[in-house]
């Protein structure tokens, strides 16, 4: 599974509410990722069996929406990735290279 | 409905129509989101971004081992057809290259022609062996045993990857010599073409790897 800051963002977003099924557009809005960046990440996660997908039960007159949720494996991987990303962020000096 | 919204929905529905079987569900998911986005311009940006799904050409995922015999049969039939076409191509090009060898006026030309004739002989031998292998009578019974069939399917996918690389190599070599009158000094151009072919065929290789992983997962579930 390819590690990238964008993937870490998506995983962190899923971890913010682990039990909830999420909509693509909500994830996009909360992470700031465009659909063309977000969906390949979701597809890769699903391919590695880290993400499950389902169709929303349709309300009358409204087409169902696709929803996503991390699997157990996905949650384990997400926690690892997010904590690694946080450790790296803490290790980096905040004003490195900034001249006064 | 505004024009911007109409364009966004049109793009989304085209993405669904043109998406590969393995991406269809994702494309539909993207389309539904475009429908619920309130801002027209945001919906358009969303729809434009969704076109990226079209670059991903993947097969519909396997959901059970029961689907494997039909997939294997399809793959074997496709392989047989390709072997037939490539055999005809190898024979034709090989004979033309042989003539090229006798007609060559320089040592460089003769070296180039010898190289492609050699590639043709190797390709022909491989194809004849492959044709024989795909006709073996025991393969007919293979479809009754799901696990054996899945293993054969995986092996066939791996063989196709190797064959694909080999024939890309051979085709680039052939084309390159025709373009440059069999002159071996243009090998760098051949290397570039071959690299380009490999990049283009990367997706097929990825698809095959994905399928092998799916089969492994299904076999794992069964055990």
Image (tube, helix red, strand yellow):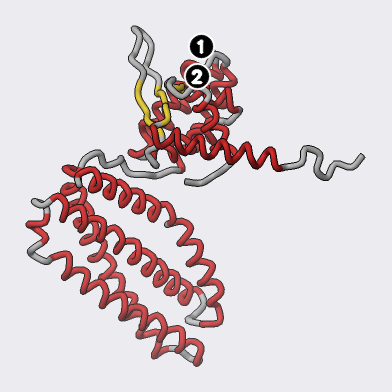
Instruction: Give me the residue at 67% from left, 39% from top.
Output: A89
Specify whether disc 2 shares its chain with disc 1.
Answer: yes
| Element on which disc 1 rests | loop
- The disc, 2 or 1, on the residue closer to the chain's N-terminal end is 1
| Element on which disc 2 rests | helix
Q: What residue would you read off at disc 2? A: B6
Mark linked to residue B1: 1
The reply to whether the C-beta atoms of the residues labelled 2 and 1 are less than 8 Å apart is yes
Q: Residue B161 placed where, x, y %?
A: 34, 61
Q: Quarter of the image holding residue B125?
A: bottom left
> In the rendered view, would you say B32 is above or below B15?
above
> In the rendered view, would you say B145 is above or below A17?
below
Is residue B24 or residue B218 the one in the foreground?
B218
Instruction: Give me the residue at 53% from left, 24% from top.
Output: A16
Chain letter of the residue beneath label 1 in the structure image: B
Is residue B9 or residue B198 the one in the foreground?
B198
- Label 2 vs label 1: CA separation? 7 Å
Instruction: Give me the residue at 36% from left, 18% from top.
Output: A56
Tally of marks: 2
> In the rendered view, would you say B112 is above or below B194?
below
Q: Quarter of the image holding residue B101?
A: bottom left
Q: Residue B164 placed where, x, y %?
A: 36, 63
Residue A74 appears anywhere in the view:
yes
Is residue B33 or residue B170 the one in the foreground?
B33
| B216 relative position to A97: left or right | left
Mark linked to residue A20: none
């Amino acid at each position: 599974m390819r590690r990238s800051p964008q993937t870490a963002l998506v995983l962190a977003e899923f971890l913010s509410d682990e039990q909830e099924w999420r909509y693509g557009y909500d994830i996009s809005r909360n992470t700031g990722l465009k659909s063309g960046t977000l969906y390949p990440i979701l597809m890769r996660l699903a391919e590695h069996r880290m993400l499950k997908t389902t169709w929303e039960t349709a309300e009358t007159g409204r087409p169902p929406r696709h929803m996503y949720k991390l699997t157990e494996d996905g949650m384990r991987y997400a926690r690892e990735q997010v904590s690694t990303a946080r450790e790296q962020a803490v290790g980096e000096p905040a004003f490195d290279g900034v001249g006064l | 409905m505004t024009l911007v919204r109409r364009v966004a929905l049109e793009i989304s529905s085209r993405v669904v129509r043109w998406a590969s079987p393995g991406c269809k569900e994702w494309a539909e998911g993207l389309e539904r989101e475009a429908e619920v986005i309130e801002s027209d311009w945001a919906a358009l940006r969303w729809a434009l971004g969704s076109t990226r799904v079209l670059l991903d050409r993947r097969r519909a995922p396997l959901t059970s081992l029961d689907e494997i015999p039909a997939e294997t049969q399809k793959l074997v039939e496709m392989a047989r057809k390709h072997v037939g076409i490539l055999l005809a191509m190898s024979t034709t090009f090989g004979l033309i290259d042989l003539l090229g060898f006798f007609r060559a006026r320089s040592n460089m030309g003769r070296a180039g022609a010898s190289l492609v004739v050699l590639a043709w002989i190797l390709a022909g031998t491989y194809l004849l062996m492959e044709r024989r292998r795909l006709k073996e009578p025991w393969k007919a019974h293979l479809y009754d045993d799901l696990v054996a069939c899945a293993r054969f399917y995986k092996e066939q996918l791996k063989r196709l990857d190797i064959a694909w690389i080999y024939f890309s190599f051979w085709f680039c070599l052939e084309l390159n010599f025709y373009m440059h009158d069999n002159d071996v000094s243009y090998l760098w151009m051949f290397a570039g073409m071959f690299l380009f072919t490999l990049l283009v065929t990367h997706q097929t290789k990825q698809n095959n790897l994905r399928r092998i992983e799916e089969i492994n997962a299904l076999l794992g579930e069964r055990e």
